[in-house]
Image (cartoon, rainbow, N blue to C red):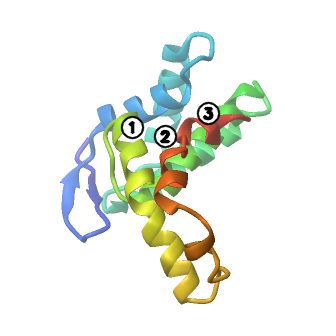
Amino acid sequence: MGITVVKRNGEREPYDANKINLAIENAAQGLDDNITWVTQIASELELTLFDGITTQQLDEAVIQVALQNVKDDPAFDTVAARLLLKTIYKRVLGDYESHDELVELHTSRFRGYIERGVSETLLDGRFTTAFDLDRLAGYLDPSRDELL
């Protein structure tokens, strides 16, 4: 397949099915026979790919393929939700490779996000004075986001 993917920074790179397969495998973790999940979603995804697809379009396509299969097995909804969560993390926190790195990103950026919310008057200013933001950041656990 001679498909190139356009990254967020405008760079082009060859489509790497292994990256997608790994993301699907991670999203199917804990479900029965996750190799079958990877194979089915990845093979259906390849039908939707085109040269010059953006990473955002690719992320959305993987989620849509999973959602299309919910009618056959409701567990596809769990896979789609986990893929969407990973997409949200990437948009907000940037790329990460491991769960430990994701935890570190949550912890290290929490204070800045709260302070920005206060400065843009999206959050009450008392957030920065009434709470120990570093302590709160230490309690963040991204795995709780998957309590579906």
Q: Position of residue 85 (x, y in %)?
A: 57, 48
Query: Which image quadrant: the C terminus?
Result: top right
Residue at screen point 49% across, 24% down: 38
Q: Amino acid at mark 2?
A: Leu
Counting every numbered tag in the picture gives 3
Q: CA distance from mark 1 to mark 2?
A: 10 Å
Residue under label 1, please give it: 20
Inter-mark Cα distance, 1 to 3: 13 Å
Is tag 3's residue or tag 2's residue first in the polypeptide sequence?
A: 2
Give the mark, 1 or 2, whose residue is nearer the N terminus.
Answer: 1
Of the residues shown, which amino acid type is indicated by label 1? Ile
Residue receiving disc 3: 79
Q: Amino acid at mark 3?
A: Val
Q: In the image, is 12 to the left or to the right of 58?
A: left
Note whether residue 56 is visible: no
Query: Residue 53 occupies which quadrant of the picture?
Result: bottom left
Q: Which mark is residue 45?
A: 2
Badge 2 density bin: few <14, some 14–19, many ≥20, Cα 10 Å: some
Task: Please report contact status of discs 1 and 2: CB closer than 8 Å, yes or no.
Answer: yes
Q: Quadrant of residue 65?
A: top right
Q: What element does badge 2 sit on?
A: helix
